[in-house]
Image (cartoon, grey):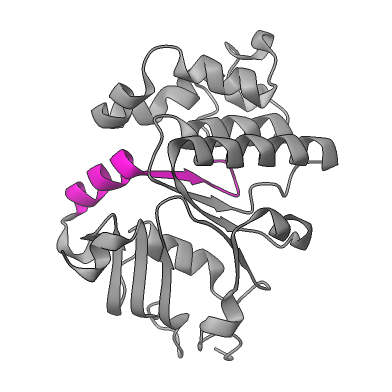
């Protein structure tokens, strides 16, 4: 068994520089998550958070070092295989939601199951409805196009989509930024309870320091990313 196999997500000796940039965006020794870990990743704008999440998800490949999801290094897979591995094992909550506005709420939540038979089997019948019920989104909204929902409602749909089928790793990029306090509390309860039930590791990025106490570990990205704060 390689060292990567012990982790849900492993990033080792990582370096990445955007094309034509003068300096690296990411330069860190190590960031790892064990199965079931909950990690709150914080740092100011410009410290490399979005770049790091893209590397973690295999959307970007590092210039040096390794990134592995469930022991499988992204760089060892072709583009199609990366897509399949991501669809099977990773849930992602985007800051801008990335819902398909013309699809219904239910169809948006079920979308990962169309790309991953593995997650569809784990989800079983009624999984989308159960997630939406727990999110507090009224049933009267479920058949509506997602583009008609409020910002806060769309965020809850995006969370349900990421959680369906119990992916082993969930990445959340500023997921509470559009929510007021009551909805934020309900959202966090939903996200953390589902990750705990599924044994999913959670990498959560936010500027909201009030949320940090809910997590098993808090990581300051500028403290581990030697590239943070370097002028381009």
- Residue shown at the point (26%, 30%) measured from the top left: 118
131 vs 40: above or below? above
Q: Is residue 91 magenta?
A: yes
Q: Is residue 103 magenta?
A: no
In the image shown, does 139 or 95 lie closer to the viewer? 139
151 vs 85: above or below? above
In the image shown, does 197 or 163 lie closer to the viewer? 197
**Which residues are the magenta region?**
79-97
196 vs 147: above or below? below
Residue 74 image position (x, y, % from top left): 24, 61
Residue 114 image position (x, y, % from top left): 31, 25
- Residue shown at the point (70%, 60%) measured from the top left: 212
In which quadrant of the rendered image does the C terminus lie? bottom right
Residue 104 visible in the picture: no
Residue 223 image position (x, y, % from top left): 59, 84
Classify residue 210 by image quadrant: bottom right
């Amino acid at each position: 068994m390689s060292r990567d196999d012990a982790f849900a997500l492993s990033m080792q000796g990582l370096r990445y520089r955007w094309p034509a940039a003068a300096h690296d965006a990411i330069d860190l020794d190590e960031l790892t998550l064990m199965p079931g870990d909950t990690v709150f990743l914080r740092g100011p704008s410009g410290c490399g958070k979005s770049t790091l999440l893209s590397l973690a998800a295999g959307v970007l490949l590092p210039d040096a070092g390794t990134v592995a999801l469930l022991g499988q290094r992204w760089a060892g897979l072709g583009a199609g295989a990366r897509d399949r591995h991501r669809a099977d094992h990773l849930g992602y909550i985007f800051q801008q939601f990335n819902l398909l506005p013309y699809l219904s709420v239910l169809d948006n939540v079920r979308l990962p199951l169309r790309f991953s038979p593995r997650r569809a089997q784990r989800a079983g019948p009624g999984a989308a409805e159960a997630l939406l019920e727990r999110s507090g989104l009224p049933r009267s909204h479920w058949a509506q196009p997602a583009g008609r929902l409020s910002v806060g409602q769309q965020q809850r749909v995006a969370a349900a989509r990421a959680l369906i089928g119990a992916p082993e790793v969930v990445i959340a990029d500023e997921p509470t930024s559009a929510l007021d306090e009551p909805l934020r509390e309900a959202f966090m309860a939903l996200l953390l309870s589902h990750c705990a039930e599924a044994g999913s590791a959670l990498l959560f990025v936010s500027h909201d320091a009030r949320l940090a106490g809910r997590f098993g570990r808090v990581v300051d990205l500028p403290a581990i990313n030697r590239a943070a704060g370097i002028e381009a």
